[in-house]
Amino acid sequence: MKQQLRDRFGRIHTNLRISVTDVCNFRCIYCMPEDMAFMPDAALMKFDEILHLTRIFAGLGVNKVRITGGEPLVRAGVPQLIAQLKQINGVKDISLTTNGIGLITQAQALYDAGLRRINVSLDTLNEEKFEQMTRRKVLSRVIAGLKAAHQCGFDPIKVNAVAMRGFTDDEIVELATFARDNGYQLRFIEFMPLDADDIWGRNMFIPGKEIIEKINAVYPLEPVTLNGDAARDAKSDTAKRYRFADNGTEVGVIPSVSEPFCENCNRVRLTADGKFRTCLFSLTETDLLTPLRNGASDEAIAQLIRDAVAQKAAGHKINAADFIKPERNMSRIGG
Ligand code: SAM
Ligand code: SF4
């Protein structure tokens, strides 16, 4: 029988996020400080190690892989890595999350490598706010990167916007207009307590419901339904999905804080230094890279993975009194 990564709550894990680097050319305030310290190169998984571990995961039923970081496109050779990941038996779907700036030069190579789905992070269309948010003055290059990806034929192109109170409120409709006019699928992500600077607070995120209401007041939305449930398409989808009633383009929210989706979570993660995490908010992780480098067998590594999944917590505790923030911030986990 084909192996599955089933945990004690019956959740089957088929979705792996691989961080290829913790380095980034931005310094988003909700993610990392300006003086971020990065991992030494020797600590990072080499591409052949990523491929080796992915083969083991695929043998355990993983069929979806997302490449992330840090900023994945600052690492040389990502298109080649993607082409090789696509060859792995069992990997049916591959996608990439990027801050978009590298797409101006790399969109075509990524497309030629067989990548079709990308998520580009873009929180604002206002230059000053962009600089405030990312600490970089490069908004026009991100927009040019999005256009380059569009011209190559990427489909879908999703735009991720972290929604922060006092920052995003007055731009929700503008971002929605930008996305629908360009055919990008916009996803607002609730700001989560994964920032390195500890700026997160309960008053800092905008609930997804409020975002949808604001958009719906200007552009009527209809839910993308599954069994009449608005509107996570598959049980494991993190996004609540809607479409503009007049043009069909999708828009959604990822309400990780206000409406957690832990119950149906099918995701696991591999950090750039080869640590396996069963949740963004895990307080423990399992080192897979050291055993791999020490010559452990594939079966021994598979057992480490199975054991970790067996211990996966029921859910994150952002809304509980005993919530403890993980030591790693988002860029060191791989969002
Ligand atoms: N550098 C790439 C990028 O920004 O798209 C990929 C890595 S980034 C860590 C992945 C996603 O996590 C981005 O969409 C980013 O906006 C999101 N993110 C980072 N910190 C976050 C936080 N504290 N809460 C919610 N989303 C966050
Ligand atoms: Fe870099 Fe992405 Fe973190 Fe922004 S969110 S600092 S682009 S890793």
Image (cartoon, rainbow, N blue to C red):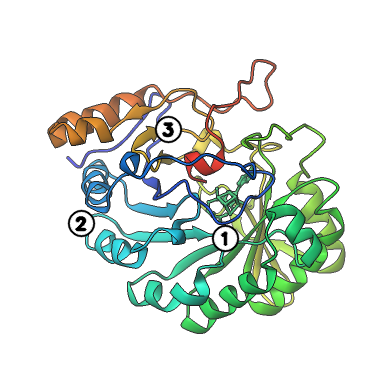
Amino acid carrying label 1: it is Asn
Residue with the mark numbered 2: 89
Ligand 2 has an atom within 8 Å of the beta carbon of the residue at disc 1: yes
3 relative to 166, above or below: above
Total marks drawn? Answer: 3
* Residue 269, quarter of picture: top left
Give the SS element for disc 1: loop
- Using a 10 Å C-alpha cutoff, classify the residue at mark 2 as few (fewer than 14 neighbours), some (14 to 19) or many (20 or more): few
Q: CA distance from mark 3 to mark 1?
A: 24 Å
Amino acid carrying label 3: it is Thr
The image position of residue 125, as x and y in percent, is 76, 67
Nearer to me, 73 or 320:
73
Q: CA distance from mark 3 to mark 2?
A: 23 Å
Residue with the mark numbered 3: 278
- Using a 10 Å C-alpha cutoff, classify the residue at mark 1 as few (fewer than 14 neighbours), some (14 to 19) or many (20 or more): many
Q: Is disc 3 in contact with disc 1, using a CB cutoff of under 8 Å?
A: no
Viewer-nearest of discs 3 and 1:
1
Q: Residue at x 20, y 56 (%)?
A: 89
Viewer-nearest of discs 2 and 1:
1
Nearer to me, 172 or 167:
167
178 relative to 335, above or below: below
Visible in this render: residue 102?
yes
174 on left or right of 121: right
Residue positioned most to the top: 322
Amino acid carrying label 2: it is Asn
Q: Earlier in the sequence, mark 3 or mark 2?
A: 2
Q: Earlier in the sequence, mark 2 or mark 1?
A: 2
Residue with the mark numbered 1: 99
Q: CA distance from mark 2 to mark 1?
A: 29 Å
* Residue 170, quarter of picture: bottom right
